[in-house]
Amino acid sequence: MRTLALRYVFEDVPRLVASLAGIAFAVALVLVQTGIYSGFVRSTTLLVDNSEADLWVASRAMSYLEITLPVPYSWVARIGALDGVQHAEPLVLRSAIWQSSDGTLDYIRVIGFEPAGSSLRLGVSPAALTAMRHGDVATDAAQLASLHAAGVGARGTIHGLPARVAVLTQASQPIISPTFLYASLDSAVAWAPLSLNEIMDGQHGSGTPLNYVLVRVRTPGSVNAVRAAIERALPSARAFPREEMAAITRTFWVERTKIGFLLLLGASLGVFVGGIVVAQILYASVNEHLREYGTLKALGIGDRALYGAIALQALTLAVLGYIPGLAIGIGVAAAAAAGRGTPIEITPSGAVLAFAVALLTCIAAAFVAVQRAVRVDPALAFGA
Amino acid sequence: MRSAVVAGDALYYRYPGSVAADDVLHGASLAVAAGEIVLVRGHSGSGKTTLLSVLAGLLSPARGTVTVTGTDLGALDRGARARLRLAKVGFVFQRFQLIAALRARENVELVLRAGGVAPRDARRRSLETLDALGLGAKAERYPRELSGGEQQRVAIARALAKCPAVIFADEPTSSLDSSSGAEATALLCALARGNGAAVVIASHDERIAPFVDRIVSVADGRCG
Ligand SMILES: Nc1ncnc2c1ncn2[C@@H]1O[C@H](COP(=O)(O)OP(=O)(O)O)[C@@H](O)[C@H]1O
Ligand SMILES: [Mg+2]
């Protein structure tokens, strides 16, 4: 029966190719959609993930990474003086507009930090960052087009002040955010002063208002103790461990954009279409062999053997369709990465999920088709 | 008389959708003993195929009982009837009904494997049976590469290989024009006799008569 099941799969090559195409299509869609999802989700927390800070200290009012109230610069020194803190550094996140030398505008997010000793890792040597002068920016290589900048040395203005692309960074640009420009704290503040509202709402004292103070602790196990010490010393502060900061931001974007639902919808449609194709093809195959199924049943071959045979066909199709589907998914991800710098992350769990989906789709399709074979009248075999 | 391997008693059968006057079987009875070969004769449309189908458990009679090797088919569900057929019943269908995607040997092996015979044994028995029918050299051919007579012998091999208690053969010669059909049927009878299998052949081919033990005629839905 196994031999026969496989002969039925391979006897009609165009039909086999069509069903494999259906499965590959569904697999590739699931891979790409889950890949977009993981790529998107990971990209929302890129700034947090790129920092080696153990704690992110922010205003109590912080909603997620990009929406928070300013805190006073004096916190850097106060936190740095606490027991267990190895390093405290300022971080500002400001919105502004870049005007390139040819006059084109781009919406930007300026990340101001102190490169010396910073916990930010941007895929370039720390020396390249510390060498940046006032008015220099570091930006992701993939953003040059958006900035209308030819490369390192390209000039523009921000808030009427000169700016220059000095360093190209790697994996430092979230998908849905404006162009990230990394610069020294002084440059960032000069280009993008706080709005009056933010100043009014913030409870800062003297100095440059900050968005975050990033903290590295002296001993790895002491994060919670240091966190408590900071919140005790600064009642209007909250200190988030890096993973918690990332989780808050991730959750915000996932809920805000409903991206999971949208991608799920897309993937489901793909799986549905692929499933219909496979079911249709298996059904046609069963129909074509209806008389033979009748003969098999007359000979005494039971329903279980028929189900087994169709399940084997489903498994074979799933495996054979999965391989090109996986290749297409990986190809699309590679093309996307090369072309637009859009991260589509094909993860092992995404690949496993896609295979499970392929298998379930084939089994469901086979189950539909086998009903026809099971119901065929064995007395058909005696018919002339 | 020895105890019957297959026995139908007072069988009534009517195809779904037809009326009472159209009863194809109308109190038909037939009992066949182990090793006995019975020819069921009757003009076309007299109900020979229907009788075989009912005796084999492919159709359920409206009234009457069928026992195969002592088991009452009426007491079995569909699956159990299929298992009984797989274990005890061989078939030679009118159009042979070989599986086109399988080689001659594989066609024979299929029922053996489904019946739980180990792959190696199934292969050996399949080749032996095909050999006994003079097809040893063509065992690896697909049905479409065989003549009608050869296909019929593969079908006979498929029925014989599992050493069934009873073999039903419906019009085994009707799709063959030469005398090879009758010869192959004679071979079927000889080999079945050697195995002690009961054989029921439905046919109006006079050439088969010399090989059988008993001839019954079907008319008006009864056996005489
Ligand atoms: N599937 C069926 N549905 C309805 N009537 C049938 C069917 N098969 C056979 N018959 C009728 O039953 C009668 C007996 O048919 P059958 O048993 O095939 O006769 P035989 O094999 O002797 O030629 C015929 O009148 C035939 O028309
Ligand atoms: Mg007939």
Image (cartoon, rainbow, N blue to C red):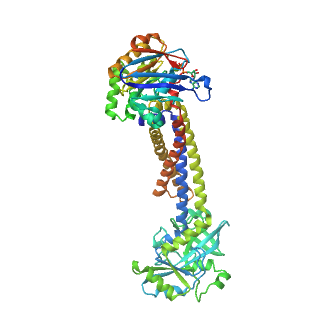
* Figure quadrant of residue A312: top left
Residue B212: image x %, image y %? 40, 14
Residue A367: image x %, image y %? 52, 43
Which residue is more in the foreground, A190 or A121?
A: A121
**In this rendering, does residue B61 appear at all?**
no
| Ligand 1 placement by image quarter | top right
Residue A263: image x %, image y %? 58, 57
**Left/right of residue B88 with respect to residue B14 in the rendered view:** left
**Left/right of residue A207 with respect to residue B74 in the rendered view:** right
Which residue is more in the foreground, A154 or A255?
A: A255
Residue at image location 47% in from the left, 57% down from the top: A349
Residue at image location 47% in from the left, 71% down from the top: A121
Is residue B95 depicted above or below A174 in this figure?
A: above
Is residue B211 depicted above or below B53 in this figure?
A: above
Is residue A287 depicted above or below A197 in this figure?
A: above
Which residue is more in the foreground, B154 or A204?
A: B154
Residue A22: image x %, image y %? 55, 44
* Number of disc labels: 0
**In this rendering, does residue A334 appear at all?**
yes
Is residue A356 depicted above or below B141 in this figure?
A: below
Figure quadrant of the N terminus of chain A = top left
